[in-house]
Image (cartoon, rainbow, N blue to C red):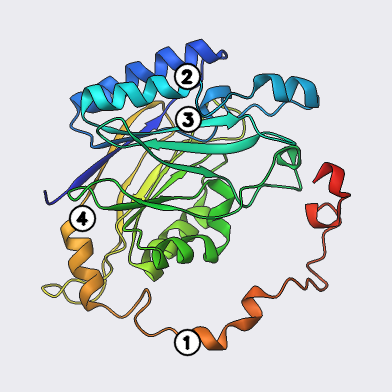
Amino acid sequence: MNNLKVALLQLMPTGTLDGNLQKGMEYCRKAKAMGADIALFPEMWSVGYNIQEDIQELKASAISADSEFVQSFGKLAGEMNMAIGITLLEQFEPLPRNTICLFDRFGRGVLTYAKVHTCDFGEECRLTAGDDFYVTDLDTEQGKVGAMICYDREFPESARILMLKGAELILVPNACPMEINRLSQLRARAYENMVGIATVNYPAEQPDCNGHSTAFDGIAYCPDRPGSRDTLIIEAGEREGIYIADFPIEEIREYRRREVHGNAYRHPKKYSILVSEEINEPFVRKDYRRYLPLSIR
């Protein structure tokens, strides 16, 4: 297997959990018919990225990772021989989490990741942040896959940790306007880590979103070409649809064996300041959850 096809499901939510289940399964089947190996949903598909202001309503809209909604996608993955990355507002204490559950092509749950970098300056202050980044081996053909979610993209450490853990492809559910600077961040994460990155956003009809789901393969230089190349595989428009990102996984692996980025020439002993928790002006933000009482963090 030389390529890995990721279906970016740039879809509008229906407004109900059951509606999102039925529409999500319908589009997974369409993605399989288009030759996809992995189908990926935008951020918090179960609720269409709707974070209730009332805490009790928020908790009531959250679902378990073992819920019928989530497990239905696992069953479908096994039936279709296609991996599925389903996203949800996950039941968790003290507050719900922003989560992706990845099922492999045999229908096995192989990765559950909760967003580490929650947007504490906005409505995600009402969510529990995740505590680590994870990588899984889908199988010997499909390679090692990790995940980060939306705002995680803005911290180089997210993709770097996933690369160090072996990720060849990073799945990125998203729910925000994808403009040139955010796209540049994703391009940079792919380039500096020599990793494929697949990002799926909601279409423009969704508030505060604009489509432009993207995929980058991270291969900047080819032996048979002068200079560098754009690592962009695909950039969707604003409309709802399925967009297939065709990752040359064997080429990515060969590129990682010969090029100079990633982990080849790092100096980790010189990076101790990166794990310091000290925050100085002008970067102090009083709404950062570290400053909040323990009872509401």
Say which label, 2 or 4, has the lower sequence index. Answer: 2
Work out how far the residue at label 1 is from the one at label 3, CA to CA, in angstroms.
41 Å
* Between discs 2 and 3, the one toward the N terminus: 2
Give the residue pinned by disc 3: 203
Residue 69, disc: 2
Tag in front: 3 or 4:
4
Which of label 1 and label 3 is nearer to you? Answer: 1
Q: Is residue 235 positioned above or below 253 on the image? A: above
Identify residue for label 1. 267
**Position of residue 277 measured from the top left corner of the image (x, y, whole percent):** 73, 71
Name the residue carrying label 4.
249
Asked if labels 1 and 4 touch by Cβ distance under 8 angstroms, the answer is: no
Circle 2: element type: helix
User: Secondary structure beneath disc 1?
Assistant: loop
Q: Amino acid at mark 4?
A: Ile
Q: Is residue 274 left or right of residue 4?
A: right
**SS for callout 3:** loop
Q: How far apart are the two marked residues, 3 and 4, measured between alpha carbons?
A: 27 Å
